[in-house]
Amino acid sequence: MEKAQSSPALGVFWMIVTGFCFVAVTALVKFLDNAIPAAEAAFLRYVLGLVFLLPMLKSLMAVRLTPKQWKLFGLRGVAHTLGVILWFYAMTRIPIAEVTAMNYLNPIYVTVAAAVFLKERLAARRILAICAALIGALIILRPGFREVNSGHLAMLGTALLFACSYLTAKLLADEVPASLVVAMLSITVTIGLAPFAFAVWVTPDLHALFICFGVACFATAGHYTMTLAFRSAPLTVTQPVTFLQLVWAVSLGALVFGEPADIWVILGGLLIMASVVFITLREAQLKRRRVTPAVNEPKT
């Protein structure tokens, strides 16, 4: 496949669209407002989203996986299933801004897990960035100064489980097509959510079904536009744009759901996001050093 031409402006545009899509997902889940249990809402989101796999069904069935790949897909499915349930639960318990801010912990968890399980080097600067992110999380939670409820704990678990899912996806992406990684996630999570959903099943009305389908549409669109952003520009350009999601989440919570803007949540979220941006920029810098020839080295 021909390499896509770099276009920073286009990459920023697609990342802004991605942010709108993911904030829309958060808002729609908030609109459900406990109309149906969290596990059922998550199941309906994924089962309705399977319609987007139909055009790829023939090519997906032709793929042959090794036992190791099946295990990795299974592990990712379990981690993502539990993470999705906790995320839907957290959405009904804490403000949108807090969910969005705490979601920024995902890359931090991925960095730590990569060092532990993939033996990637964890330099001092990375460690300082991780510590700063953890301080950001403490600023948001403020244990001892306010009540830390089950929604906050659910989001901590969500970030950890999603980090496991993303790390597994990184391993799989080196061996199978990206479309298969996305498709298998949808299939395994749908299967994984089914027993949890049926255990607490409440017959949904058309309003709930419509919202869940909207969640599936915006989530799929968000992942697609995020891919376009990554193809158009490097992470050093697109990653900082993601902090706008916190701005939109705070605005949406205040204007639509009557959730007061909490300065501590904003500060904590910005500190976590700054840590993520630092790690991203540092990785890009190290990558350029590895691929840039030395002064006396022939540049072929």
Image (cartoon, rainbow, N blue to C red):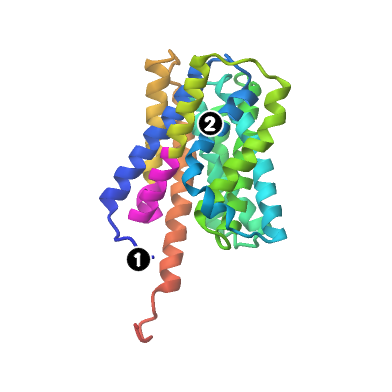
Q: Which of 102 and 176 is in front in this view?
A: 176
Q: Which mark is residue 26?
A: none
Q: Identify residue type, mark 2.
A: Leu
Q: Is mark 1 on a helix, strand or loop?
A: loop
The answer to if 225 sits in the magenta stretch is yes
Q: Residue at x 44, y 36 (%)?
A: 270
* Few, some or many residues within 10 Å of mark 2 (<14, 14–19, 20+): some
> Which image quadrant for residue 126?
bottom right
Region of the chain picked out in magenta, as a range: 221-239
Q: Which residue is drawn at 55% across and 58% down?
A: 173
Whole-Å distance between the Cαs marked 1 and 2?
A: 33 Å
Residue 251, above or below 275? above
User: In the figure, is residue 230 to the left or right of 54?
Assistant: left
- Check disc 2 and report the residue beneath it: 48
The answer to if 245 sits in the magenta stretch is no
Return the residue found at the far front.
Answer: 58
Asked if residue 167 shows in the view, the reply is yes
What is the quadrant of the C terminus in the image? bottom left
